[in-house]
Image: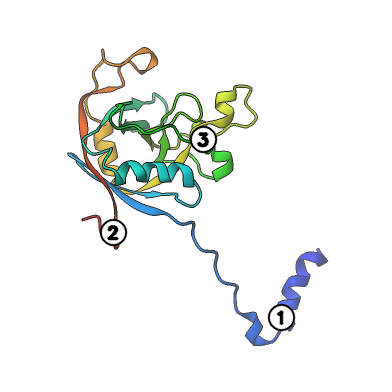
Amino acid sequence: MMKAILPALALLAAPLAAQEAPPRAESPVTTLVVIETTMGDITVALETERAPVTAANFLRYADEDRFDGTVFYRAMHLDWGEPPNGLLQGGTQNDPERILDGIAHEPTSETGLSHTDGALSMARLDPGTATGDFSIMIKDQTGLDAQPDSADPNEQLGYAVFGYVVDGMDVVHAIHASPRDPEAGEGWMKGQMLAEPVKIVDVRRVEDGSAD
């Protein structure tokens, strides 16, 4: 117990000038981006400091207009928890005219990020194959985080979170609630495809605090 008390005693004995509170740690650096859709705008903060590789990849797609004209095409609805619950997915859909090379995987166990409500996460097959498709979490989906103790090598690495929605979750929910085609989609994704995919008009950086 004495070790816990000593630092406080030292502060009390110090001159007043030395008793100023230490500067607060700065928040991690992020970059704001607006995803303009035909159903409204979604503003996201990309974790350029904590997930630099994945965030830079998304920014490159945005800066090179590779997302413009793509769509949100998949709405996964989960049967447990209070609705809405699941994720919304969009992006380049492996279009060879749009995609870039896959990027190095940044597991959440290294970035300290998590698949909480509003998180952006890269879609992928094997780790290191993520290109231009991404998902937005609706409610916490932390089972997608890296699970280092799992016996499954894929689950050990999980998926890469690289940002969070800071405005426009109502738009995310509205797109997620759009009608789905019960026959569209393959395998376990059957029934998760939107009957009328929602167009992504433009993805751009927010300059000077304005999304205009």
Residue 83 visible in the current orientation: no
Above or below for 26 versus 10: above
Label 3 sits on a secondary structure element that is loop
Q: If the image is split into quadrants, where does the N terminus sit?
A: bottom right
How many numbered marks are there?
3
Identify the mark nearer the N-term, 3 or 2: 3
Q: Where does residue 144 sit, x and y in percent of width and height?
A: 49, 31
Identify the mark nearer the N-term, 3 or 1: 1
At label 1, counting other C-alpha atoms closer than 10 Å, the crowd grade (few under 14, some 14-19, many 20 or more) is few
- Please tell me which residue is depicted at 35% across the width and 44% down the height of the picture: 60
Q: Where does residue 133 sit, x and y in percent of width and height?
A: 35, 32
At label 2, counting other C-alpha atoms closer than 10 Å, the crowd grade (few under 14, some 14-19, many 20 or more) is few
Label 1 sits on a secondary structure element that is helix
At label 3, counting other C-alpha atoms closer than 10 Å, the crowd grade (few under 14, some 14-19, many 20 or more) is many
Q: If the image is split into quadrants, where does the C terminus sit?
A: bottom left
- Please tell me which residue is depicted at 47% across the width and 43% down the height of the picture: 53
Q: Which residue is mark 3?
A: 105
Q: Where does residue 17 sit, x and y in percent of width and height?
A: 63, 86
Q: Whole-Å distance between the Cαs marked 3 and 1? A: 48 Å
- Please tell me which residue is depicted at 25% across the width and 55% down the height of the picture: 211
Marks 3 and 1: which is nearer the front? Answer: 3
- Please tell me which residue is depicted at 56% across the width and 26% down the height of the picture: 155
Circle 2: residue type: Glu
Side of 174 relative to 162 (left or right): left
Q: Which residue is mark 1?
A: 12
Q: Whole-Å distance between the Cαs marked 3 and 2? A: 28 Å
Circle 1: residue type: Leu
Of 122 and 192, the residue lying toward us = 122
Q: Which residue is mark 2?
A: 207
Q: Where does residue 55 sit, x and y in percent of width and height?
A: 42, 45
Label 2 sits on a secondary structure element that is loop
